[in-house]
Amino acid sequence: MTSILATRPAARAVPRGHQSPHQPRLDGLGAGLDLGLLICVAFLLGLGFVMVTSASMPIADRNYGDPFFYVLRHGFALGLALICGALCFAVPLHAWQRAAPWLLALGIALLVLLLLPGVGRTVNGATRWVPLGVFSLQPSELLKFFATLYVSDYMVRRRLEVQTSFSGFLRPMVSIGIACALIMAQPDFGTAAVILMTVMGLLFLGGVNLRYLGLLVPAVAGLLVMLILVEPYRLTRVTSFLRPFDDPYNTGYQLSQALIAFGRGEWLGVGLGNGIQKQFYLPEAHTDFLLAVIGEEFGLLGVLLIIALFAFIVWRAFDIGARAHARGALFSCYLAHGFGLLLGMQVFINVGVNTGLLPTKGLPLPFMSYGSNALIVAVMMAAVLLRIDFELRRRKGEPIPNGRVQPVLRSRRWSRA
């Protein structure tokens, strides 16, 4: 079975006290970081803060009498995200791997806690938050992080079982399925779908028998269709995005206003702060539809730049995962690919919703949209990616275990039962 990533010969061990000609000396922390990834994430965080300020001031002034109400909260969340990111970067990867099953159990326990009367905070009919004083914890966002850790660890511990037996494939799906069911009970349809798709993508990369995935995909698709049909508002969302201007003041209102924002922006936009759609026309302008505000104020070129930056981050995640695979660091390999899939799918869905390519669903734009929990988790994922890259750079020059790397990613030839 030929691996997508070619195996490499063993690197010669470097004698102690000697410096390999191919190994840079890490005199400072900056030399051991992926500066491209770091700068890209920092740019998106900074631009996101500017755009949340621009998009939120009108509605904050109307609702709270303070135009900086959301800005201050977003700034607090950004500071908290940077602290959490620094802490995540400081944790060695082997510690993340040991803690992965316990973190998933903690996430599921928090989701169960939301079901208890009087514990969760309900907003717009959804009970997704646990109030903690000045901060409200959203367990479903943490589940994105915890589920990726858990599945990455599971595929290392049970690699042969995942690839050869149905029970090995089913065990992680049961755990993740329970978590997703609890998330949908809030209800939060979009987050559950993103987590489930990420897990299935990771299992595919891990070499699971395609017949098992073939059994799961129709079952999941049927369940999603049933959930859409039993809730009228979900069915309306699915059908209204196809022709939003047929009912621009009711079911198609949000999408039609977003499309108007993109149309007004044309190529170069109307300028920062000069957008009109955020002036009480476009709902959720500072959260799920922030990209539409960017399109109006910075134009198509600004939107394409944002998409290119996200594509770069996803590419860096996959590249880091490929290098981890080449070094035999399987947990790091799966984790980097998982975070790349997770971020990529969230961006794809958010862009698709904003542009009318997908049904309207509330998913924030990573690193940019207003929303404390989503922002913190996105920064945590970026920090762990930087940690993986940092540890790989420190290991550069060490011999590859056993002289070669065992193929662990999906082969070119699909596995057979």
Image (spheres, rainbow, N blue to C red):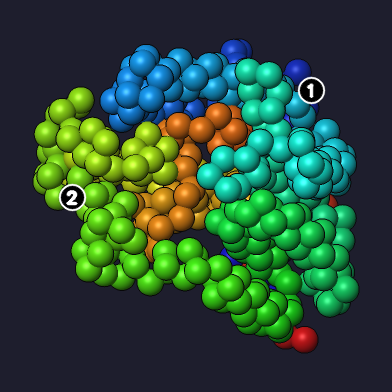
Image coordinates of residue 316 in percent, x first then y, are 50, 43
Image coordinates of residue 396 in percent, x first then y, are 66, 34
**Compared with residue 2, is residue 237 higher up or lower down, i.e. above or below?**
above
Left or right: residue 320 versus residue 366 is right
What residue is drawn where x is 14% and y is 42%?
265
One can see residue 144 in this view: yes
One can see residue 401 in this view: no
Left or right: residue 92 versus residue 66 is right
Quadrant of the image containing the N terminus: bottom right
What residue is drawn where x is 64% and y is 28%?
136
Q: Nearer the viewer, residue 258 or 281?
A: 281
Q: Which residue is mark 1?
A: 16
Q: Amino acid at mark 2?
A: Ile
Q: Nearer the viewer, residue 279 or 296?
A: 279
**Marks 1 and 2 in Cβ contact (< 8 Å):** no
Name which quarter of the figure residue 412 lies in: bottom right
Q: Which residue is mark 2?
A: 260
| Secondary element type, mark 2 | helix
Circle 1 Cα neighbour tier, 10 Å, few/some/many (<14 / 14–19 / ≥20): few
What is the C-alpha distance between the residues marked 1 and 2? 64 Å
**Compared with residue 158, is residue 208 higher up or lower down, i.e. above or below?**
below
What residue is drawn where x is 33% and y is 20%?
61
**Compared with residue 285, is residue 66 higher up or lower down, i.e. above or below?**
above
| Secondary element type, mark 1 | loop
Name which quarter of the figure residue 130 lies in: top right
What residue is drawn where x is 77% and y is 86%?
417
